[in-house]
Structure formats: C-alpha cells, structure tokens
C-alpha cells in the first residue's frame, strides 16, 4: 500500500514539473507591461498558426529608422472568437498597432489592438465579444400574444 501511495505522489509531482514550463510560456516577464506603444506601419506578413498568430509590419522608430516588428496574439481559435481571420491582413495594408513591447528594446511585442485600413479595430485581449442579440428579441415594454 505504501509503495502504491509513493507511486501516486511521484506521478503527481512529475506532472507538476512537466506543467511548469507551460505556465511559464504564458507569462508576461519579457514584456514591458507598463509601456504602451502605438505604431503606424505597413504589414509585411500575417502568420495564422498555433500556438500563436503573429503580425509582422514595418514601422518607423524614434530615430527615423524603419524596423520590422513582430507582435503576437493568441491562437487562431481564440482570435476567431474575437473577429479575427486568416485573411484579416494583406501584405501592404497600412495599419495602426497598439502593443506592449519587450523589455530589451527589440522590435517584438504583444499586440493589444490594431486599426485596419477599412476603419475596423480588432482587439487581441480581454473576453471575446458577446454574440449579437437576435433580431427577434422583444424591446422592453413590448408584449407578445399567443393565439
């Protein structure tokens, strides 16, 4: 019985050790969460893939040099729920990107929102938007008769 209990404890501990890297992967330690940048740029690539999607774009930095940024969002399933799609961006699109940069100054970050050429804004964070109410929903004060 003691050997069985020891085996269960060892298995639980092993699972805990294996899950720690997965939790660390989704941490915010590399991002400067106190810094908020908004950059206007031109899309160079849109990578719609697991485990993260990436938007790459060229934008001018403070010195006037053009840098190629790579910003991440969640996976395609999560992003679809927020209104994003495989065809949300085309190479050459002019966009305005709000992001949290990495702490080391590299042109890498976590995308928060992006304004598209057609005026729409896509959000990468927070809860997915609530589904629209069906058109047949009654307005307050309306009544419905059953016949």
Image (cartoon, helix red, strand yellow):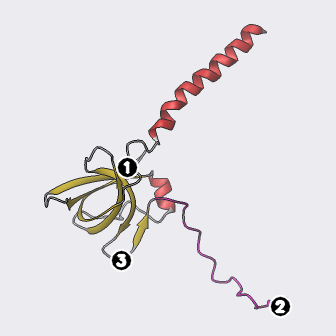
Residue 119: which numbered mark, if any?
A: 3
Relative image position of residue 72 (x, y in whole percent):
37, 51
Give the residue drawn at x 30%, y 68%.
96
Tell me the magenta residue range: 125-145
Relative image position of residue 144 (x, y in whole percent):
80, 89
Please indicate whether residue 56 sits to the left or right of residue 136 in the image: left
Give the residue drawn at x 71%, y 85%.
138
Please indicate whether residue 77 sits to the left or right of residue 56 in the image: right
Which element carries disc 2, helix, strand or loop? Answer: loop
Pick whichever of labels 2 and 3 is earlier in the sequence: 3
Q: Quick one: quadrant of the N terminus?
A: top right
Q: Which residue is mark 1?
A: 32
Relative image position of residue 107 (x, y in whole percent):
25, 50
Give the residue drawn at x 13%, y 58%.
65
Relative image position of residue 27 (x, y in whole percent):
46, 42
Pick whichever of labels 3 and 1 is earlier in the sequence: 1
Q: Real-space Cα distance between discs 2 and 1?
A: 58 Å
Q: Which residue is mark 2?
A: 145
Pick whichever of labels 2 and 1 is earlier in the sequence: 1
Please indicate whether residue 67 sits to the left or right of residue 19 in the image: left
Which element carries disc 3, helix, strand or loop? Answer: loop
Quarter of image, res 55: bottom left
């Amino acid at each position: 019985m003691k050997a069985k209990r020891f085996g269960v404890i060892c298995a639980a501990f092993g699972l805990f050790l294996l899950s720690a890297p997965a939790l660390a992967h989704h941490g915010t330690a590399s991002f400067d969460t106190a810094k908020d940048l908004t950059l206007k740029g031109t899309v160079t690539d849109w990578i719609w893939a697991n485990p993260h999607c990436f938007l790459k774009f060229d934008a001018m930095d403070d010195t006037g040099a053009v840098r190629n940024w790579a910003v991440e969002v969640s996976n395609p399933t999560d992003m679809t729920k927020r209104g994003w799609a495989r065809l949300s961006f085309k190479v050459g699109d002019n966009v305005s990107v709000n992001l949290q940069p990495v702490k080391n100054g590299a042109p890498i970050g976590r995308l928060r929102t992006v304004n598209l050429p057609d005026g729409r804004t896509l959000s990468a964070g927070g809860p997915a938007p609530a589904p629209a109410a069906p058109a047949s929903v009654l307005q307050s004060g309306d009544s419905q008769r059953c016949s």
